[in-house]
Amino acid sequence: MGWTTEEFGDSHEGIVGAVLADGSEPKPAYFDIGSGAEMYRTSEWWAYDGSVTRPRAAAVRASCSCGWRGPSTPVPWDELDTDGLEELDVSGPRRDWSEHIRAVERQTVPLPADLAGLLNALEDKLIPLAEDAPAAALRAVAALDRLTRRAGREAACVLEEEGDQRWEALGRALGIGADRARSLVTRYLLLR
């Protein structure tokens, strides 16, 4: 299971990936998880222990679904128990990926300070309200939903009017992939 943030979702899903002795990444590993046509697929380092027909990882590194890769750290196989794959300290790759996410955040379009403050204040009010007065919280959330749909549609319409949309640039501004940026704009265009 990978690492994600609520804001960027699967556009920046991170894992501890395997690195082979030649510096390349292995193809995804597939596991039969029982009856049926479904196969579990992973590129996480632990799947590359040299068993069955899978290669053995020489190193690990943080890998992000956006294509970013962190620095490699050798796997000390001789220090790990045969069943002790969980003994490998992967805190370094996790920190590397977290720094990557901070870099992505710094590259996104900044929110106006007063709006960021309002959003933080709203969160500070709504979360406790959900516990203390759930009906009032739902009423507030419904009002916010109407507001965000209207504002999202307006923004999407302006983007559409500009034509020849540069989805890569919009995706970078939002910290997501180009396909997800296009999908977001389309979603708001379709709202009524």
Image (tube, helix red, strand yellow):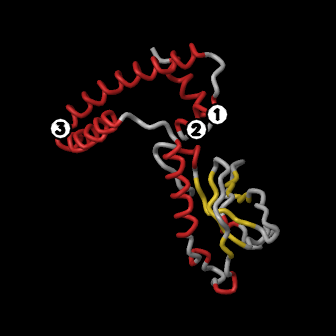
- Check disc 3: other Cα within 10 Å, few if <14, some if 14-19, many if 20+: few
Amino acid of disc 3: Ala
Q: CA distance from mark 1 to mark 3?
A: 42 Å
Question: Residue 103 got which mark?
Answer: none
Query: Helix or strand or loop: what does disc 1 sit on?
Result: helix
Query: Helix or strand or loop: what does disc 2 sit on?
Result: helix
Q: Is residue 27 above or below residue 166?
A: below
Amino acid of disc 2: Arg
Q: Earlier in the sequence, mark 1 or mark 3?
A: 3
Using the rendered view, name the quadrant where residue 20 is placed.
bottom right
* Residue at (47, 43) in percent of width and height: 7
Left/right of residue 68 with respect to residue 101 in the rendered view? right
The C terminus is located in which quarter?
Answer: top left
Q: Quick one: 143 or 22, which is closer to the camera?
A: 22
Using the rendered view, name the quadrant where residue 121 is placed.
top left
* Residue at (69, 58) in percent of width and height: 43
Left/right of residue 133 with respect to residue 7 in the rendered view? left
Q: Residue furthest left?
A: 132
* Residue at (45, 17) in percent of width and height: 154
Q: CA distance from mark 2 to mark 1?
A: 6 Å
Q: Are marks 2 and 1 in contact (CB under 8 Å)?
A: yes
Left/right of residue 150 with respect to residue 3 in the rendered view? left
- Check disc 1: other Cα within 10 Å, few if <14, some if 14-19, many if 20+: some
Amino acid of disc 1: Glu
The residue pinned by badge 3 equals 133
Q: Nearer the viewer, mark 2 or mark 3?
A: 2
* Residue at (49, 46) in percent of width and height: 105
Where residue 78 sits in the image (x, y, percent)? Answer: 69, 86
The residue pinned by badge 2 equals 172
The residue pinned by badge 1 equals 168
Q: Quick one: 55 or 91, which is closer to the camera?
A: 91
Where residue 172 sits in the image (x, y, percent)? Answer: 58, 38
